[in-house]
Image (cartoon, rainbow, N blue to C red):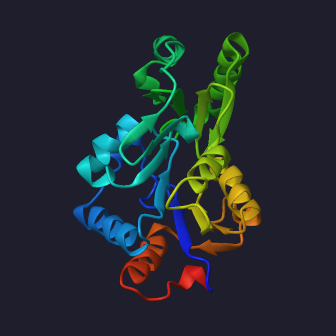
Amino acid sequence: MTTPLALLLDFDGTLVPTARTPDGVMVSEELRALIAAACERLDGRLAIVSGRSLGQLDQLWGRALWPVTVAASHGQELRHDGRVRAPAPPRIFASLARATEARFGAAQGVVIELKSHGLGLHYRLAPRLHEQVRAWAEECAAAHDLVIQEGEMVYELRQPGADKGDAVRAIMAMAPFRGSSPLYIGDDFTDIAAIEAARALGGRGLAVGSRIAAHADGVLADPAAVLEGIRALAAGKRAAFIT
């Protein structure tokens, strides 16, 4: 008997192309419909695992995301069957956002992404400030007992604790995921822990692009290739990334 598939998906850089700024991402009606169809085809065994906060994701997706299991804030927030499990948002990140604004100022191109459980310091618009942003992130982390999560042209400050690997393990312990084989797809350093967790649970992990290809069981070229595979899966065909 074939073990059923569970599909766990990163968001930025996996389902949608990485934008120049966090608020530059758009979720199309086609993507909403595709995820709904794939979730139905998998009998609910589809989850989004993202570094964005739950509030950010809901703002982008609207009601389309409500039936889908979502692990947000690198696993600090988990919504399943309409119920949310999350600690109270800490106040430190709003304070650090103000301090970062005072340190760099919007005119310099550092984009500050305040989340419920983290703070993203994006330097995509100001690559010349890479070292300064890293030094500031290290200073903030040391002063407030935070950890730094490096991503594609971003340093994210967050509290020690849950990562995407923890999120995968939590999701796979719940019905209807329990007993299925996880396939995790992601593109950035934060997704490595999730790929390792999927493997430990008898599944696989795929990279989107080359950034974490060495840590994955296979590589998909870009988000368009991910959507092509999900489209085949939703149509009842054997998606290329499953073979």
Q: Quadrant of residue 166?
A: top right
Q: Quadrant of residue 204?
A: bottom right
Q: Is residue 56 left or right of residue 14?
A: left
Residue placed furthest toward the bottom? 237
Q: How many marks?
A: 0
Position of residue 168 measured from the top left corner of the image (x, y, whole percent): 61, 52
- Most foreground residue, 105 or 203: 203
- Most foreground residue, 56 or 125: 56
Is residue 93 something one can see in this rendering? yes
Please tell me whether residue 164 is drawn above or below residue 137 in the rendered image: below
- Most foreground residue, 92 or 214: 92
Is residue 103 something one can see in this rendering? no
Q: Is residue 25 left or right of residue 191?
A: left
- Image quadrant in which the C terminus is located: bottom right
Please tell me whether residue 112 is drawn above or below residue 220 in the rendered image: above
- Image quadrant in which the N terminus is located: bottom right
Q: Is residue 113 left or right of residue 29?
A: right
> In percent of the image, x 67 and y 21: which residue is there?
146
Q: Is residue 168 left or right of residue 29?
A: right
Position of residue 74 measured from the top left corner of the image (x, y, whole percent): 57, 40
> In percent of the image, x 47 and y 25: which residue is there?
108
Please tell me whether residue 197 is drawn above or below residue 62 in the rendered image: below
> In percent of the image, x 62 and y 46: which residue is there?
164
- Most foreground residue, 219 or 89: 89
> In percent of the image, x 54 and y 85: which residue is there?
240
Position of residue 77 measured from the top left corner of the image (x, y, whole percent): 49, 36
